[in-house]
Image (tube, grey):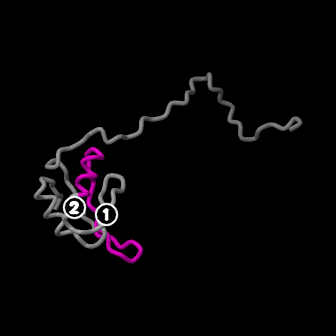
Amino acid sequence: MGGKTNLFEIGAQWGEGWSLEEEPKATAATHLAPNAHALTLQRQKRNGKVVTIIGTFAVEAGVLASTLKALKNTLACGGTIEGDTLLLQGEHATKAKAFLQAQGWRFKH
C-alpha cells in the first residue's frame, strides 16, 4: 500500500467518548390479555390467492401458535404466523372474527 492514506477516515478515535453500544431492541415484553387487544382483519391477494390477515397480537408465541391451530382446525384451512400476525389461506374474515370473539379476543371494528 506504499504511502497511501485512507480517504474515508473521519478522524474520530474510540477513546474520545465514542463507544459501540447497540440500542436495546424492542421486545414484545408487554403481553396483553385477549380482551385488551384491538385486532384488525385484512384481506390481501398474494400470488393471485386471497389471504386473511389477523393481527396485531401481543401475546407469547405459544398462545399465538395454539390460537392459529384452533383457527385452522375450525375453518379447515392452512395458515401461518408472520411476526405478530396470523395469515389464513382463503377468505375467512367473518368466520375467523366470530370464532376469535367467542374465545374472548377483541377487535377494533
Q: Quadrant of the C terminus?
A: bottom left
User: Residue 104: x percent and y percent?
Assistant: 12, 53
Image point (27%, 66%), residue name:
42
Q: Which mark is on residue 71?
A: 2
Marks 2/1 in contact by CB < 8 Å: the verdict is yes
Q: Which residue is mark 1?
A: 79
Image point (28%, 52%), residue name:
65
Q: Earlier in the sequence, mark 2 or mark 1?
A: 2
- Please indicate whether residue 2 sits to the left or right of residue 94 in the image: right
The kind of residue tagged 1 is Gly
Was residue 82 drawn as part of the magenta stretch in this picture? no
User: Residue 55: x percent and y percent?
Assistant: 27, 57
Q: Which of the 4 quarters of the picture holds residue 2?
A: top right
Image point (15%, 54%), residue name:
105
* Element assignment for label 1: strand
Q: Which of the 4 quarters of the picture holds residue 7?
A: top right
Q: Which of the 4 quarters of the picture holds residue 67?
A: bottom left
The kind of residue tagged 2 is Leu
